[in-house]
Image (cartoon, grey):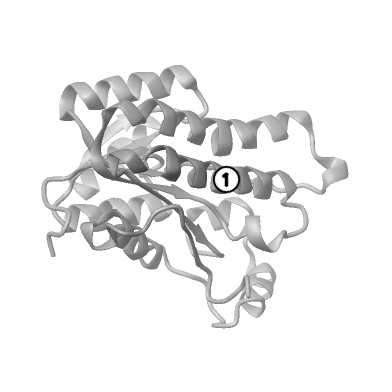
Amino acid sequence: MENLKDKVAVITGGNSGIGYATAKAFNENGAKVIITGRRKEAIEKAASELNVSGLLADQSNLSDIERLVSEVKERFGKVDILLINAGITKFAPIDLMTENMFDEIMNVNFKGAYFTLSKFIPVLNDNASVVLLSSTSATISPQSASVYAASKAAINAVMKIASLELASRKIRVNAVSPGPVATEIMNKIGLDNNLEKQLINSIPLSRLGKADEVADLITYLSSDNASFITGSNFLIDGGQSV
């Protein structure tokens, strides 16, 4: 498979989980892949394992985003595929949400994603594909996820407007909304056997998703096979949101 042959693809947050799996899939499909991350050792290790380029960038930092765009443009020229994947997951009931946690979630998941898209638009090729990683949390409204869900709902709104603003250049903009996926982030939020059982019980297909399943969907949306798809949000959640 080389349906992304020689296309330049940028993946933010590509050192683990869905970003890592997508970088692997893009590479196998012939793309020139650049992954980003805010942890130097992690991004260097992932880039070496995947045989792709790795650039250090913190999505919550606007100057980092601007430096990233400048470096990608200088080293690779125009960009054909942009996957805005970097994000954080933190939960608290509304009455216990702190301003610091609110700002941290929004700065990465919404503000950072928004300005990553904004700053990359001038270096996107015509006919490029942009995919924003959203979440089913924006659809199913889980308790204790008010700010996280709001950050992803905001991403979905921006995705639709961007698809209209960029349509004249034939740039397609879509969102992918995974449900619970077995990735490193699950361990970070404290996934134990009881929580895993609760999650699985909420999913009609009775299992967690896999990162490479989400990567396959993103790869399709990034290819010319999806050239008539834009402004859409794709839920991949085993039926959880039904």
The residue that appears at 52% across and 72% down in the rendered structure is 208
Q: Quadrant of the N terminus?
A: bottom left
Count of all numbered marks drawn on residues in the image? 1
| Quadrant where the C terminus is found in the figure | bottom right
Q: Measured from the top left, where is residue 126 in percent x and y?
A: 24, 39
Q: Is residue 35 left or right of residue 146?
A: left
Extreme front residue here? Answer: 168
Q: Is residue 17 above or below residue 9?
A: below
Q: Quadrant of residue 32?
A: top left
Residue 41, quarter of picture: top left
Q: Position of residue 164 (x, y in %)?
A: 44, 43
Q: Residue at x 20, y 31 (%)?
A: 78
Q: Is residue 56 visible?
A: no
Residue 65's place in the image compared with 15, above or below, is: above
Query: Residue 134: x and y, percent?
Result: 52, 51
Closer-to-camera residue (48/85): 85
Q: Look at mark 1 in the image and give the residue it sits on.
A: 157
| Residue 163 in view | yes
Q: Residue at x 66, y 50 (%)?
A: 149
